[in-house]
Amino acid sequence: MSAQVLLVSPSFYSLFSLFSSLLAISQLLLLLPSAAHCAETLFEGGTVLSFDDVTESVKVLFNTSILVSGNQIVSIFPQSQNITLPPGTEIIPSQGKIISPGFIDTHRHLWQSAFRTLGSNTSLAEYFDRYSEFTQAQTVFTPDDVYYGQLIGIYESLNAGVTSILDHAHHTWSNATALAGLNASITSGARVWWCYAFHNLTNGYTREDQLADFEYISQYGPWRNSSTTTLGLAYDPLSLDPPSLVQTVVDVANTTIERTVANMNLVVNSPEIANSYGILNTSIPVVFSHGSYLTVQDAELLRSTNQYLSITPESEMHYGHGHASSQLIQDQAALGVDTHFTYSTDIVTQARIWLQSVRLIFYDQVRANWQIPRNNPMSVNQAFLLATRAGGLALRRPDIGVLVEGAKADLVVFDGAAPNLIGWVDPVAAVMLHSNVGNVQHVMVDGVFKKRDFNLTLGADYSEVQQQFLQSARRIQGIWEATPLPDLEGDYPFSSGVLYGQAVTADVIRGNGTGY
Ligand SMILES: *[C@@H]1O[C@H](CO)[C@@H](O)[C@H](O)[C@H]1NC(C)=O
Ligand SMILES: *[C@@H]1O[C@H](CO)[C@@H](O)[C@H](O)[C@H]1NC(C)=O
Ligand SMILES: *[C@@H]1O[C@H](CO)[C@@H](O)[C@H](O)[C@H]1NC(C)=O
Ligand SMILES: *[C@@H]1O[C@H](CO)[C@@H](O)[C@H](O)[C@H]1NC(C)=O
Ligand SMILES: *[C@@H]1O[C@H](CO)[C@@H](O)[C@H](O)[C@H]1NC(C)=O
Ligand SMILES: *[C@@H]1O[C@H](CO)[C@@H](O)[C@H](O)[C@H]1NC(C)=O
Ligand SMILES: *[C@@H]1O[C@H](CO)[C@@H](O)[C@H](O)[C@H]1NC(C)=O
Ligand SMILES: *[C@@H]1O[C@H](CO)[C@@H](O)[C@H](O)[C@H]1NC(C)=O
Ligand SMILES: *[C@@H]1O[C@H](CO)[C@@H](O)[C@H](O)[C@H]1NC(C)=O
Ligand SMILES: *[C@@H]1O[C@H](CO)[C@@H](O)[C@H](O)[C@H]1NC(C)=O
Ligand SMILES: *[C@@H]1O[C@H](CO)[C@@H](O)[C@H](O)[C@H]1NC(C)=O
Ligand SMILES: [Zn+2]
């Protein structure tokens, strides 16, 4: 739920183009002695889901090895090729494995882990009253609560092979809770775009306070030292705030931070409004979450300004805000999770839900015409690209979401011999339609193992984090369980003339049943 703006490291483009030209001679580099500080890892002889820049499509490379040096993929070559490895290269046998780029989540609120399973049948209106940033969370959540919730949320992602996350960080209720979520992001070693949310709170932490804190963090925050966490900003009330207040945020985006990504909310915000403030057609990457009310003009603006929509399929179904036309703008879209406490979180599952939804929508159009579809409207390769490269493009990071020479070493190794995968012929279909999180054997982010042989490798303190999180979660859950559900009657307060309505409730018991 929300909107965000986020920032990508300013020096990236120059570094990437420099590296691309260096990589043209990567075979030569292989023969050079490695720099002493760089760790080399060879994933030997796997099936690599690479990318062909010319045809812009998935390129499957069988019996292929990947050499990682530092945080980069420096070489991808046939296993049979006789090459000289840098001394000390660690070999990870990958025969029978499927090696995918790390998956990219372009919309998330990582702090909410403590609510896990509390919202199994919640609706969007109830969510705002009960679980959002605008609730008692502002006063109940301590910095430690935010820290452990955020960390567990990231661990869940890493475990599933989600290596990059755009975090719409609306736990910015004080300087301290903001810093705690940022710290957890950095500590995790996942690639996190931590996007500070600007919002009107009821706890006395004003917009001025938030701007001051953001500017302080942007200059002195610990993210500046991190190779994986990037700062951004998140801004939902774009169309609700008075223009002068919007302008302060636009100015901050434009001046304090060099590159930002905005992720606008479903009901009120739109690319058209963002464009009217001049923030769409710039070098700042802007990601809009949920295309529930996207217009054709919005879609055209996304294309002409090369900005992206984050489709969060399960969220949009769970809460009901929907994705009426998102299937028509998939060329400017990536995938996201949103509120991971309410449903499944891995991006492969999101891609699978989305793939089958799109198939049904396009099939329905043919059947509504009393015809029989002869073809399948969407391929697994397209869903795979949405889950990987499209996320990188949304963040204007062509070096993530692809396994190519020069890309960041963010990768996922699937155990292709698991009972649900063995016998695969098409590795993309295996991952997209048959895999599960339990098949994720290794996960590397920025050249560092985050999961190895099915175990998270987060340092010896994981059990400590588990305990701290559980303690925090149990306290919070007790408070929420004791809080009555909101009374959603009469007028919906955020749009004049709109009433609350009753959805039909499903009943799987014969007769009158029980309803729930
Ligand atoms: C990969 O190598 C295996 C064993 O070395 C071989 O059986 C298989 O045919 C190779 N696959 C391809 C596509 O070259
Ligand atoms: C690979 O190259 C090394 C030296 O570069 C050579 O000693 C070795 O015989 C070669 N192996 C094969 C299988 O060609
Ligand atoms: C959700 O389901 C629980 C029972 O599992 C029920 O107590 C609660 O009232 C339901 N909430 C809503 C909003 O329907
Ligand atoms: C976050 O990290 C900074 C700098 O390392 C430290 O001063 C601060 O106490 C940390 N805050 C939290 C809540 O962990
Ligand atoms: C929050 O941080 C800002 C920027 O450093 C500072 O001006 C302000 O005093 C801080 N607020 C509190 C309550 O510490
Ligand atoms: C940056 O990293 C260095 C070395 O790891 C550390 O000594 C320093 O305290 C860090 N600075 C900040 C602001 O986190
Ligand atoms: C937020 O608060 C400001 C005053 O600080 C007010 O001008 C603005 O209308 C409020 N925005 C929303 C969306 O309520
Ligand atoms: C950003 O700043 C530049 C330089 O000050 C200015 O030319 C440009 O209009 C600003 N863009 C926005 C969207 O405010
Ligand atoms: C975006 O800016 C370019 C020039 O920088 C201009 O050609 C194009 O028309 C602009 N597009 C929109 C939608 O404003
Ligand atoms: C993975 O964790 C389990 C349980 O903690 C442990 O028994 C096993 O040895 C670990 N495996 C590896 C490869 O570290
Ligand atoms: C279902 O409910 C209606 C009215 O609430 C009642 O008249 C009817 O007897 C019920 N039927 C069954 C099968 O319980
Ligand atoms: Zn959201």
Image: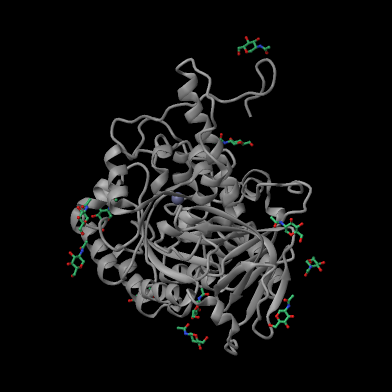
Question: Residue at image x 57%, y 60%?
Answer: 101
Is 409 or 286 nearer to us in this picture?
409
Image quadrant assignment for residue 469: bottom right
Image quadrant assignment for residue 144: bottom right
**Ligand 10 quadrant?**
bottom right
Image quadrant assignment for residue 498: top left
- Residue 136, visible in the rendered structure: no
- In the displayed structure, does residue 59 sit left or right of residue 474? left
Residue 434 in picture, x, y percent from top left: 68, 44
- In the displayed structure, does residue 208 sit left or right of residue 403? left
Q: How many marks?
A: 0
- Residue 311, visible in the rendered structure: yes
Is residue 61 positioned above or below 362 on the image?
A: below
The image's colouring method is one colour
Residue 53 in picture, x, y percent from top left: 46, 58
Is 393 or 243 nearer to us in this picture?
393
- In the displayed structure, does residue 181 sit left or right of residue 493? right
Residue 237 in picture, x, y percent from top left: 31, 51
Q: Quadrant of the C terminus?
A: top right
Residue 401 in picture, x, y percent from top left: 51, 60
